């Protein structure tokens, strides 16, 4: 750990206390209202919001995390309002049942108001450089892969290796440097070549929100988060009605993609439940220049959740999902995927005391994931040359987490907890030639196990207008292999200890200060360590995904954890009809995991020019982002965003791999209030996406320059009869030929995978 990282961890640790308390559980005859209020644009919690039941003159104010609780409310139906200076008032009709808890999620739209001639704009209390996508944005985007959604956030992108399975890239960090969480469960891919990004096992129609933390500020989510992506799925907070839901079907021209989904959720007394089913299919697509790109896939998903309110303050739920994907083309890999078979399950217990008591809430989660995967070269050029390759793989993933929120002192809030992640991976490559009887067998992953666990403490305090947050965690990591081959032992050295243990301190701190009624200045710094993953430690001459070369890579069991130390500065402004966020960051990665060419190991694949070995090194990154919105008139909103990123691999003395070029998006949305017969809502949304060329590339990793491009997207939608939604859109309106710089290369042609040309989408959804 660097001295800077040690100081951060030590300072953050001083913020936290350990307070043990077991809350009593008791039912009441009256009902309870509880919920969270957030900023509709940013997703940040809003403290100090007045939540009122005007009919009975009862109300409550939200706390530092935007949560409120109203207890002892007589059974009945009420008109609820959430009011906050600088935001539009939100009104809801809510039902309260005796002995039950009605939970709400309220999102307030920013809006300047006039009080006694003084314009007052709400100052957002955010203290993390985050980005977020809400369910409405996700539904309108009409994408087949959640990874594609991330491309709309400044500083965030994704890597395309095939039609689905786009892998997140956050400010130049990728793969296991970015922790991906599905409903709190840390997930990992089954394929050594990352054909299945963790997001590929989530159907977009099930997503409630996606949150992205752009740095080492998600230390309470889990271990090794240099940056993080968290997906929350629908159904966690269903309305108090027996059944409601949506049936949806859509078609995307050019992609030949068809999707049909059904989602339902509801409550019955103390029980709540949800279910989702989805079927998707895609085909080859054409670029703007008429080139055909392999894009076949089939996917079927099923997911369910059931829970019970144990008391006014506690719930217990279980959710599970199953997915089967077949015949997936991967033009960015030497092999294609015959199938993925994925199952996930999780038990969750929550206790929410609201504003009363020292212990405010408890969250306990235990989950598991298994994915079986098979790769072959059946549709690849190597198959026609007489080579037969098949690679069956498996990943087993187990998660556990407990966290307690405490309010021991005025203006202080603490979160204490512990978590653990255990992952088992196995992959074997079988190679034969049609004119030979011998079968070559190599262990891509020789039964590798990676176990990480830690304890964490987070403290938040307000001192006047200054909001402070400090977090620290201590992690232990253990790596081992069950059945390494003799060849692997010889390659890494018979004396090398395959079993490795690491101890890692992590810490971060943020501060947010209102400068004026319109402007807020925030800053943050943190340091987090990520231990090497199974590929980096134990790969036996298997292709790497962090490069553009079709070579072989050998794991190094003794790799030190790479440590990211990052500092952030961001400025927020908000006025009547406008908002602006500027941010900048600098990151130093010590023990950066890169690789070097070996001179004494022969490759086993015909296309491999050499065998490379993972090593520790150094890297630096600097970047900035901007996002602004302006509403010159009530139905019209204009928006603009952009990002710039620079990175360098100091060990290889060249630009860092996977750095996206500067880009910007200009957009407009027109959503008038209409009353045209049975049409109640209409919107028209357009965007121009601008990307410059990228000539700063990692030549050692065979990364090549890409040209700049500009594309235009259009979307329209209308709500009919309050229950029917019609949507249509055009992506890449002018049929431009282009390739995202982060996309993988075709290993046979050497060309980067291009994006689709013009895609026309239509969707019909019916609510019930």
Image (spheres, helix red, strand yellow):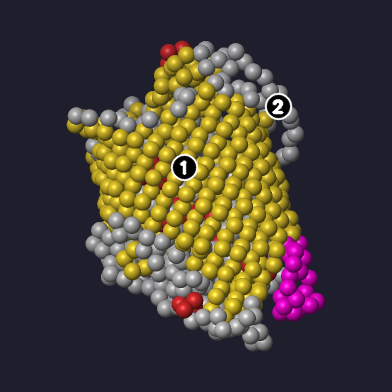
For marks 2 and 1, give the one nearer the viewer: 1
- In this rendering, would 101 be left or right of 451? left
- Expressed as whole percent of the image width and height from the top left, the position of residue 523 reads 53, 51
* Position in image of residue 491 (x %, y %): 71, 79
Q: Residue at x 60, y 34 (%)?
A: 317
Secondary structure of the residue carrying tag 1 is strand
Q: Which residues are magenta?
A: 479-501
Whether 68 is among the magenta residues is no
**In the figure, residue 84 lies in which quadrant?**
top left
Which numbered dot is residue 391? none
In front of the other: 326 or 269 = 326
Q: Is residue 13 visible?
A: no
The Cα–Cα distance between marks 2 and 1, rounded to whole angstroms, is 38 Å
Q: Residues within 10 Å of mark 1 (few under 14, many from 20)?
A: many
Instruction: Tell me which residue sits at (54%, 57%) in the image.
Output: 340
Estimate the x, y position of residue 451 in percent, counting from the top left. Answer: 71, 56
Above or below residue 197? Residue 381 is below
Q: Which part of the image, by quadrant, shows the C terminus?
A: top left
- State yes or no: residue 485 in magenta: yes
Q: Which residue is mark 2?
A: 23
Above or below, comparing residue 573 to residue 748 in the picture: above
- Residue 182 in the image: above or below residue 503: above
Q: Is residue 9 left or right of residue 574?
A: right
Which quadrant of the view contains residue 592?
A: bottom right
Q: Which residue is nearer to you in this view: 230 or 654?
A: 230
The picture places residue 301, in percent across and down from the top left corner, at 49, 47
| Circle nearer the N terminus (2, 1) | 2
State the residue position of label 1: 277
Q: How many marks?
A: 2
For the N terminus, which image quadrant?
bottom right
């Amino acid at each position: 750990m660097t001295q800077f990282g040690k100081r951060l961890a030590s300072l953050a640790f001083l913020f936290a206390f350990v307070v043990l308390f077991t809350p009593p559980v008791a039912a009441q005859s009256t009902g309870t209202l509880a919920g969270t209020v957030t900023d509709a644009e940013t997703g940040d919690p809003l403290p100090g919001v007045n939540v009122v039941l005007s009919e009975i003159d009862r109300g409550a104010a939200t706390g530092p995390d935007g949560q409120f609780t109203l207890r002892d409310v007589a059974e009945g139906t009420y008109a609820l309002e959430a009011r906050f200076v600088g935001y539009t008032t939100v009104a809801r009709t809510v039902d309260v049942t005796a002995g039950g808890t009605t939970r709400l999620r309220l999102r307030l739209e920013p809006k300047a108001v006039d009080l006694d001639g003084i314009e007052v704009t709400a100052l957002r209390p955010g203290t993390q450089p985050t980005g977020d996508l809400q369910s409405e944005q996700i539904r309108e985007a009409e994408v087949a892969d959640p990874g594609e959604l991330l491309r709309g956030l400044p500083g965030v992108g994704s890597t395309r290796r095939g039609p689905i399975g786009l892998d997140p890239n956050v400010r130049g960090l990728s793969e296991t440097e970015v922790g991906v969480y599905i409903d709190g469960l840390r997930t990992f891919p089954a394929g050594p070549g990352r054909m299945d990004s963790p997001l590929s096992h989530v159907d977009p129609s099930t997503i409630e929100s996606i949150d992205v933390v752009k740095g080492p500020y998600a230390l309470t989510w889990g271990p090794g988060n240099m940056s993080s992506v968290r997906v929350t799925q629908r159904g966690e907070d269903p309305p108090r009605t027996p059944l409601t839901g949506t049936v949806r079907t859509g078609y995307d021209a050019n992609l030949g993609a068809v999707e049909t989904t059904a989602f339902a959720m509801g409550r019955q007394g103390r029980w709540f439940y949800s279910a989702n089913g989805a079927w998707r299919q895609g085909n080859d697509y054409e670029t703007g220049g008429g080139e055909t790109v392999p894009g076949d896939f089939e996917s079927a998903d099923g997911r369910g959740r059931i829970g019970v309110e144990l008391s006014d303050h506690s719930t217990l739920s279980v959710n599970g999902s199953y997915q089967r994907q077949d015949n997936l083309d991967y033009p960015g890999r030497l092999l294609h995927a015959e199938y993925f078979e994925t199952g996930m399950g999780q038990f969750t217990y929550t206790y929410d005391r609201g504003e009363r008591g020292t212990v405010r809430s408890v969250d306990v989660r235990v989950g598991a994931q298994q994915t079986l995967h098979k790769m072959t070269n059946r549709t690849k050029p190597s198959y026609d040359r007489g080579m037969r390759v098949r690679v069956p793989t498996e990943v087993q993933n187990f998660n556990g987490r407990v966290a307690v929120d405490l309010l021991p002192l005025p203006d202080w809030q603490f979160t204490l907890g512990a978590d653990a992640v255990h992952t088992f991976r196995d992959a074997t490559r079988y190679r034969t030639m049609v004119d030979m009887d011998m079968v070559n067998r190599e262990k891509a992953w020789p039964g590798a196990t990676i176990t990480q666990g830690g304890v964490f403490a987070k403290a938040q305090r307000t001192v006047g207008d200054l909001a402070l947050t400090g977090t620290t965690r201590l992690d232990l990591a253990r790596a081992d292999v069950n059945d390494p081959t003799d060849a692997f032992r010889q390659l890494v050295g018979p004396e090398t200890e395959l079993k490795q243990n690491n101890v890692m301190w992590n810490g971060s701190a943020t501060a947010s200060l209102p400068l004026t009624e319109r402007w807020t200045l925030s800053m943050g710094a943190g340091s987090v360590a990520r231990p090497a993953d199974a590929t980096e430690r134990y790969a036996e001459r298997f292709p790497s995904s962090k490069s553009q070369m079709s070579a072989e890579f050998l794991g190094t069991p003794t790799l030190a954890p790479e440590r990211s130390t990052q500092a952030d500065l961001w400025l927020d402004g908000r006025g009547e009809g406008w908002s602006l966020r500027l941010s900048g960051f600098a990151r130093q990665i010590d023990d950066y995991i890169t690789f070097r060419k070996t001179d004494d190991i022969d490759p086993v694949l015909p296309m491999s020019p050499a065998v490379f070995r993972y090593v520790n090194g150094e890297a630096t990154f600097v970047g900035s982002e901007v996002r602004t919105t302006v509403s010159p008139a009530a139905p019209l909103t204009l928006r603009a965003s952009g990002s710039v990123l620079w990175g360098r691999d100091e060990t290889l003395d060249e630009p860092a791999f996977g750095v996206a070029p500067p880009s910007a998006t200009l957009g407009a949305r027109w959503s008038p209030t209409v009353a045209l017969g049975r049409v109640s809502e209409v919107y028209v949304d357009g965007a121009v996406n601008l990307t410059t060329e990228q000539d700063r590339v990692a030549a050692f990793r065979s990364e090549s320059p890409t040209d700049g491009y500009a594309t235009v997207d259009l979307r329209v939608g209308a709500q009919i009869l309050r229950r029917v939604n019609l949507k249509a859109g055009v992506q890449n309106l002018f049929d431009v030929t282009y390739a995202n710089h982060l996309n993988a290369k075709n290993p046979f042609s050497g060309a980067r995978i291009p994006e689709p040309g013009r895609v026309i989408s239509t969707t019909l959804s019916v609510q019930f």
